[in-house]
């Protein structure tokens, strides 16, 4: 039996996320290899490529995607650069795994969606990795059984030890709560119709002029109410928790109590310090699923529509943060392809 050749992947963006995906493809995932890396920082791209056999460094995405040894694309560059890379990949009909956000706003997301729709088939999977986390997958499976009855409310906590220097108040919604936006839609199978953002007094640990924490409330077209505590300067670590309250019971994930120690008069465990540590298994699973599906000629996972819907919800959330009050989410009609 002839062994199939590995999927040859171009990774666009070689920062923290992109470099970690290069490592993951080379060391963890089966059935793929990195054939090209792209970064506007030529030296950084060369440094990453030097550690991978047969990998070429580029500074221009379109040039890399035209290379004969590129079968698929993983986009891990900054959000504003996603649209151009996505359109270039779709123009060549290449399968894509695009880290969230699909694009930073709903208008550009719609342009990508329209380009994919014209192909007549899906090519893009969006990197909402929580859908591949073991705890979230277990929660989704439980809800689908109907044992707990209809979901009525969801409580989410999303905490970071400290925010990056460039983080703004808007980014708490557009970059962080974007994950709860997608996971809400996925867990409940419902669209988010309105967003309200409450502004507690800022933590003394937050940088000046950063509205941190925030309390975000979603309403869905299925009648559920969802809240998100987003606190990006909590100081003690990285936590993501969710509890779904249903008619006949509740289910909670994210407590992080896989191991509890007792020693020296104390009991406790450890708290992850960043998202790459907390969701390492989810990233591994997400990428392996993408590679396997791509080699079969299929596209699975979060779609361009999911990326567009998340962008539209986050736009409404940013408006709610800055203008106050309840802001309705505006979505176009969902195309049949999705």
Image: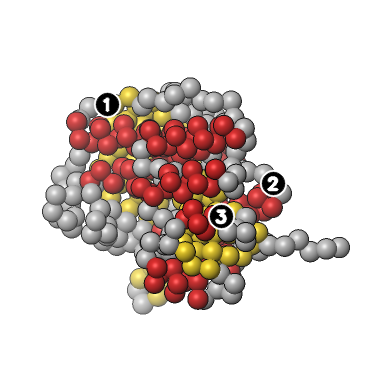
Q: Of callouts 2 and 1, which one flags the residue occurring earlier in the amino acid sequence?
A: 2
Query: Disc number at residue 66?
Result: 3
Q: How is the image coloured?
A: secondary structure
Look at discs 2 and 3 and give the one toward the viewer.
3
Please give left or right for residue 324 compared with residue 253 in the image: left
Dot 2: element: loop
| Residue 55 seen by the camera | yes
| On screen, residue 213 above or below 308 | below
Where residue 100 sits: x, y (%)?
43, 47
Residue at the far right in the pictured view: 1
Where does label 2 land, which residue?
297
Look at discs 3 and 1 and give the one toward the viewer.
3
Where does label 1 land, which residue?
326
- Give the CA separation, mark 3 to mark 1: 46 Å
Dot 1: element: strand
Between 159 and 112, the one nearer to me in the picture: 112
Please name the residue shown 20% across and 35% down the image. 322
Q: Quadrant of residue 179?
A: top left
- Give the CA separation, mark 2 to mark 3: 20 Å
């Amino acid at each position: 039996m002839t062994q199939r050749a590995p999927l040859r992947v171009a990774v666009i963006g070689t920062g923290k996320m992109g470099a970690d995906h290069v490592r993951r493809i080379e060391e963890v995932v089966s059935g793929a290899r990195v054939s090209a890396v792209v970064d506007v920082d030529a030296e950084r791209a060369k440094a990453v490529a030097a550690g991978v056999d047969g990998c070429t460094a580029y500074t221009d995405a379109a040039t890399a995607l035209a290379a004969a040894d590129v079968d698929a694309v993983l986009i891990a560059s900054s959000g504003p650069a996603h649209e151009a890379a996505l359109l270039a990949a779709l123009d060549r009909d290449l399968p894509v795994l695009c880290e969230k956000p699909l694009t930073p706003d709903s208008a550009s997301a719609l342009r990508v969606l329209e380009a994919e729709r014209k192909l007549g088939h899906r090519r893009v999977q969006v990197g909402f990795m929580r859908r591949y986390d073991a705890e979230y997958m277990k929660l989704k499976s439980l809800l689908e059984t109907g044992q707990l009855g209809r979901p009525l409310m969801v409580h989410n906590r999303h905490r970071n030890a400290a925010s990056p220097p460039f983080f703004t108040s808007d980014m708490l919604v557009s970059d962080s709560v974007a994950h709860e936006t997608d996971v809400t839609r996925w867990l409940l199978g419902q669209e988010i119709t309105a967003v309200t953002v409450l502004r507690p007094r800022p933590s003394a640990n937050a940088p000046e002029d950063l509205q941190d924490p925030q309390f975000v409330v979603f309403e869905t077209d299925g009648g559920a109410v969802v809240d998100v505590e987003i606190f990006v300067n909590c100081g003690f670590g990285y936590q993501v928790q969710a509890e779904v309250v249903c008619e006949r019971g509740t289910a909670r994930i994210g407590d992080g109590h896989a191991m509890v120690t007792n020693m020296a008069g104390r009991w406790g465990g450890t708290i992850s310090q960043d998202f790459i540590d907390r969701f390492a298994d989810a990233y591994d699973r997400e990428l392996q699923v993408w590679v396997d599906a791509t080699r079969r000629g299929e596209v699975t996972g979060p779609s361009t529509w999911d990326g567009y819907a998340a962008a539209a919800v986050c736009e409404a959330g940013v408006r709610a943060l800055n203008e106050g009050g309840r802001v309705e989410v505006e979505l176009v009609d969902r195309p049949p392809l999705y």
